[in-house]
Image (spheres, rainbow, N blue to C red):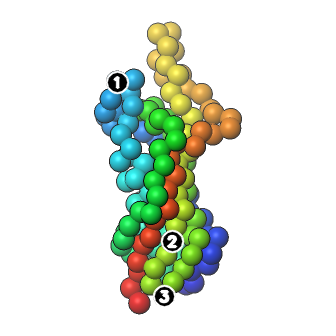
């Protein structure tokens, strides 16, 4: 296994209503950070055969709201690789959003283009 710059790992997940934390079914920013941790874990497995450990975030930007009923696409791209460290760029896009109405309670809409909700840069470490 090798840590190849440009390697991308992608997860998609539905944001359940049980995670709504604020009025308007808003979800707290920690939801995106937890998702970044999950794609970082898979990235470490792909590149190094180990789950690795998250060391730090260098930058986190919350650009748009995440709501219960959204479908998120979470990406991690390997942008730098040291002996044991891996720097990743993360993005969380809303690709679909619940659009419930009284007559269609399960209605949802695909977003085209997807909405960039959160992005960050972070560092993980793997065994030497």
> Which is more N-terminal, label 2 or label 1?
1
Question: Residue 39, can we see it?
Answer: no
Count of labels in the image: 3
Relative vertical location of residue 126 with respect to residue 128 in this rendering, above or below = above
Nearest the viewer among 75 and 60 is: 60
- Indicate the position of residue 33 as horizontal and vertical percent values: 40, 53
Number of the label disc, if any, that sits on residue 87: 2
Location of mark 3 (residue): 83
Q: Residue visible at 61% across and 78% down?
A: 4
Q: Residue visible at 51% across and 37% down?
A: 64
> Which is more N-terminal, label 1 or label 3?
1
Relative vertical location of residue 79 with respect to residue 90 in this rendering, above or below = below
Q: Residue visible at 39% across and 23% down?
A: 24
Q: Residue visible at 63% across and 33% down?
A: 111
Location of mark 1 (residue): 23
Name the quadrant containing residue 108: top right
Q: In which quarter of the image is the N terminus?
A: bottom right
Question: Residue 68, can we see it?
Answer: yes
């Amino acid at each position: 296994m090798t840590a190849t710059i440009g390697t991308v790992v992608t997860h998609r997940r539905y944001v359940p209503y049980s995670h709504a934390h604020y009025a308007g079914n808003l979800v707290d920013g920690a939801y995106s950070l937890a998702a970044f941790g999950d794609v970082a874990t898979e990235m470490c497995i792909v590149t190094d055969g180990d789950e690795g450990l998250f060391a730090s975030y260098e930058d986190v930007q919350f650009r748009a709201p995440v709501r219960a009923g959204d479908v998120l696409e979470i990406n991690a791209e390997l942008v730098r690789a040291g002996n044991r460290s891996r720097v990743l760029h993360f993005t969380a896009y809303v690709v679909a959003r619940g659009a419930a109405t009284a007559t269609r309670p399960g209605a949802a809409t695909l977003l085209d283009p997807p909405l960039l909700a959160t992005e960050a840069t972070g560092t993980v470490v793997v065994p030497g």
